[in-house]
Image (cartoon, helix red, strand yellow):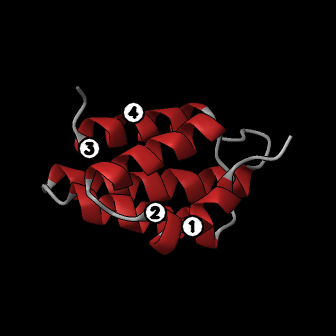
Amino acid sequence: METEKEKLDKLIFSIEKNIDKNNVIKEKIVNQILKDAKELIFYGEWFVAFENMLDNLFEYNIKLEKKEVTLIKEILEKRNENWREDWNWIENMIIKN
């Protein structure tokens, strides 16, 4: 069974892999957000990294794959966070095809 931090590592890897390489500005923004998150994780602040990363991705209107949003929900549920009430905006982060 994966820990929340392992799920976060998986999420970051997936976001890195799926960055839109055709939009240089968004790519730089996402890379900086992920770099900041990794730094916080390195110092043991993985949940702060997670919260900051989500807030920043949402602020810059960065869309995620459905599987990435599912990972976010799993992390929140493991932390006993009620994503349906407190984090419901993450549903708006899913790429619409």
Residue for badge 2: 83
Q: Amino acid at mark 2?
A: Trp
Q: In this image, 58 relative to 76: left or right? A: right
Farthest residue toward the left? 44
The residue that mark 3 highlights is 4
Regarding mark 3 in the picture, which secondary structure is present there? Answer: helix
Q: Is residue 62 visible?
A: no
Residue 59 in picture, x, y percent from top left = 61, 73
Q: Which mark is residue 10?
A: 4
Whole-angstrom CA distance, mark 1 to mark 3, is 19 Å
Residue nearer the viewer, 5 or 21: 5
Mark 2 lies on a secondary structure that is helix
How far is mark 3 from mark 4, CA to CA? 10 Å
Q: Position of residue 71 (x, y in %)?
A: 46, 41
Q: Residue at x 21, y 37 (%)?
A: 3
Q: Is residue 30 above or below residue 59?
A: above
Q: Residue at x 23, y 55 (%)?
A: 46
Separation (CA) of disc 2 from disc 3: 15 Å
Work out whether mark 1 precedes mark 2 in sequence or the reverse, and give the earlier one. Answer: 2
Q: Tell me which numbered mark, 1 or 3, is placed earlier along the sequence.
A: 3
Residue bearing mark 1: 88
Q: Identify the image quadrant of the C terminus.
A: top right
Q: Are marks 1 and 2 in contact (CB under 8 Å)?
A: yes
Mark 1 element type = helix
Q: Given the image, on which type of amino acid does mark 4 rest?
A: Lys
Could you tell me if residue 18 is visible in this image?
yes
Q: In the image, residue 88 lies at what x, y percent?
A: 57, 67
